Image: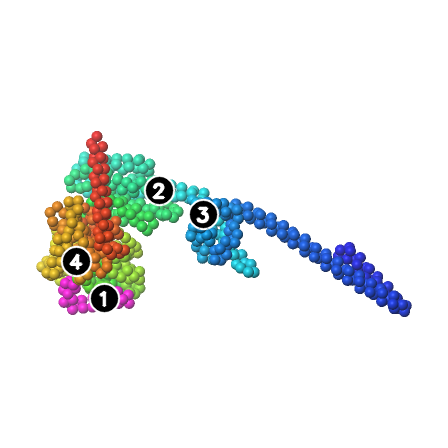
Amino acid sequence: MEVHSKIYLVLLLLSLVQALIFVVKGKILIGVTFILLSALTLVFYRFSRMLDVEKKYQDMDKLYQDIDDASSKKIFGLSVPLALIGLKGDFLWFNQQFEQHFLEERNPDVPLKDLLRKELELDLDLVLVGKTCETSYNDRHYIVEASGISESDQDMLLLYFFDVTSQKEYQDVYKQNEPVFAYLTIDNYDDIIEQLPPHERATVLSKIDVRLNEWAKALDALLIEYEKDHYIVVFEKYKLVDLEKDQFKILDDIRSIDAGEKSQVTLSIGIGVSEEVTGISKSNDLSYAALDIALARGGDQAVVRKDEVMFFYGGKTEATEKRTKVKARVKAHGLRELIREADNVLIMGHKTPDMDCIGAGMGLVGACRALETPVNYVLEAVNYSIEMMLQYIEETDLYEDIFIVPEVAEERIGRNTLLIVVDTQNTEMLAAPHLAELTNKVVVIDHHRRSGTTISQTVLNYTEPYASSTSELVTELLQYFDDKDILNETEANALLAGICMDTKMFTTKTGVRTFEAASYLKRQGADTQIAKVLLQDDLDTYLRRSKVIEKAEILHNRIAVTAFQDNGAGGRVVAAQAADELINIKGIQASFVLLKSEGVIKISARSNGDVNVQLILEKLGGGGHLTMAGAQLDDINDLDEARTLILNAIDDFIKEEKEAAEAKEKSKGENDK
């Protein structure tokens, strides 16, 4: 208790005691006077206490105000830009650093409320829920964090803009200099060893080593030979830009090595990189997977995998046959066991299936029938190109319920269902893509080069771009099933028709294994006359095809391009057949036929092998083989616009081809010196 308070209490006590004494002595008036004096003392004491308390509050308010002023000055002068905003993004306050970073060079006529959403592109909805955001402004990078402030009348957000420009620059430098692993393999090393005499073999192999070492030295990279025909190259990531700009010239340098008339030296390269900061192990895995894709596409090319996006370079030569009967036998035994162990089998091809797709599927139907495993073929719709084939198949009661629509197939998928995908591996091309996601066991059998998004989770994958057709691959597999009656006559004819269609009656893309497959089918009861009948056209189709060919334009004295619109049945067949017919014309090395049908533009391309139509159509999102490719332009429905695109793609290819030829001549001249 304070001293003056004690004095007041003593005086009050004395006055009360004195008043009591006077009252007892009968001096009431004097006693009342002392009582009044005591009351006045008490009132004065209370008033004095009120003044003291008020003064204390005033002193505390002044102290708090001084603290607030000091804090405000401190916050205003912080090195971190701060801004106080309302929940609608309106500015309530900002400090000096915010003004320096964001307002000094800003056009004052532009409303300040546009700064956050439009100029900084901040998602305030994320900021409101406490998410950290990133933004850039005037070549500087910021991480934005927020804290909520609640007042009696409104809620506010205090935004902190942390400048991370230096960290970003260091991160970019690290990303540009992080190690990249490139896997290289000599595609036809075994052919060189087998076909060349020892002295020529040594010369060719030494030239390969010299070219690769010179390339690695120019790249300032580390080249390691870890097998007789396999190499790994390590270099900084930023050098990949120059390699891509140069279209991987090393492919042409290796291809220019003279290895005799029977073989040509080719190289495959796989490189994988990621925009995320990854470890060495992940980078190595990406590159190895890219090499697998390069080899699956036929080799003689570089595949650069940037996360999930693929970029292809090279692939200018026809794939040479590399598959062995040992590999086919191993795959056949694996497929046989998968079919035998499955509760049921579903077979599915690509959208708008053709003869090869149906033929391969029917061969697998025979395998399932022989192994007594329930089987169905998933067919979304019947198109003109397979009408004859389906009519022929359905003449046999055995296949009355073999074809089912995707909706029915979905109902038949169980835990032990096996899905076999034929004639495609691209998820976007599947007749019913969702079935692959619903099935635990997926097998892929295809003869196309990989492009686009492929089915990743498979229990067995038999992809051979060297084969003439998927029907040929299936026929080869069935030979090793060790079941005598694995194919009946209908199934054998369906397989033979598929081979005949893709080889143009054994005139294109036909190898020794193709004739071996046809010979096996002949022994199983296949009839070439039936296959020929299944491939016949009616008069209307013939006339439509002739009109399309009549409108063809010849470019660069060797490439035919024509376009037409046809919403009738069989438009795609007409386009494909017109492309085939055009390359039979003297001097024509490649043909491109554009079809607009029901608002969608599709392109069929063919080549005699001198022009890689696959590379041209890959620029438009398509794919296929060197001699046969296709594309669909989903975002374009104008034929003239589509024609311009294909002409530009052809011009780019011719330009690249010319540059490659010049580089080859230059390289040859340097070697001669």
Q: Residues within 10 Å of mark 3 (few under 14, many from 20)?
A: few
**Sooner in the amino-acid sequence: mark 4 or mark 2:** 2
Q: Position of residue 289 (x, y in %)?
A: 30, 49
Tag 2 residue = 237
In this rendering, position of residue 124 left or right of residue 621: right
Secondary structure under badge 4? Answer: helix
Please say if 529 is above or below 110: below
Q: Marks 2 and 1: CB-CB under 8 Å?
A: no
Spatial separation of the CA atoms under disc 3 and disc 1: 65 Å
Q: Which sits in the foreground, 210 or 25?
A: 25
Give the CA separation, mark 4 to mark 2.
46 Å
The answer to which of marks 1 and 4 sits earlier in the sequence is 1
- Are the residues tagged 4 and 3 within 8 Å (C-beta)? no
Q: Nearer the viewer, residue 616 or 560?
A: 560
Q: Residue at x 55, y 46 (%)?
A: 77
Residue on which the image places disc 3? 107
The residue identified by callout 4 is: 573
Q: Earlier in the sequence, mark 3 or mark 1?
A: 3
Residue type pointed to by label 1: Ile
358 or 285: which is nearer to us? 358
Q: Which residues are magenta?
A: 385-411
Disc 4 to disc 3, C-alpha distance: 61 Å
**Image quarter hosting the N terminus:** bottom right
User: Which residue corresponds to the image point at 18% horizontal and 56% vertical from the top-left?
Assistant: 564
Residue at the spot of label 1: 404
The amino acid marked with disc number 2 is Lys
- Quadrant into which the C terminus falls: top left
Of marks 2 and 1, which one's residue comes earlier in the chain? Answer: 2
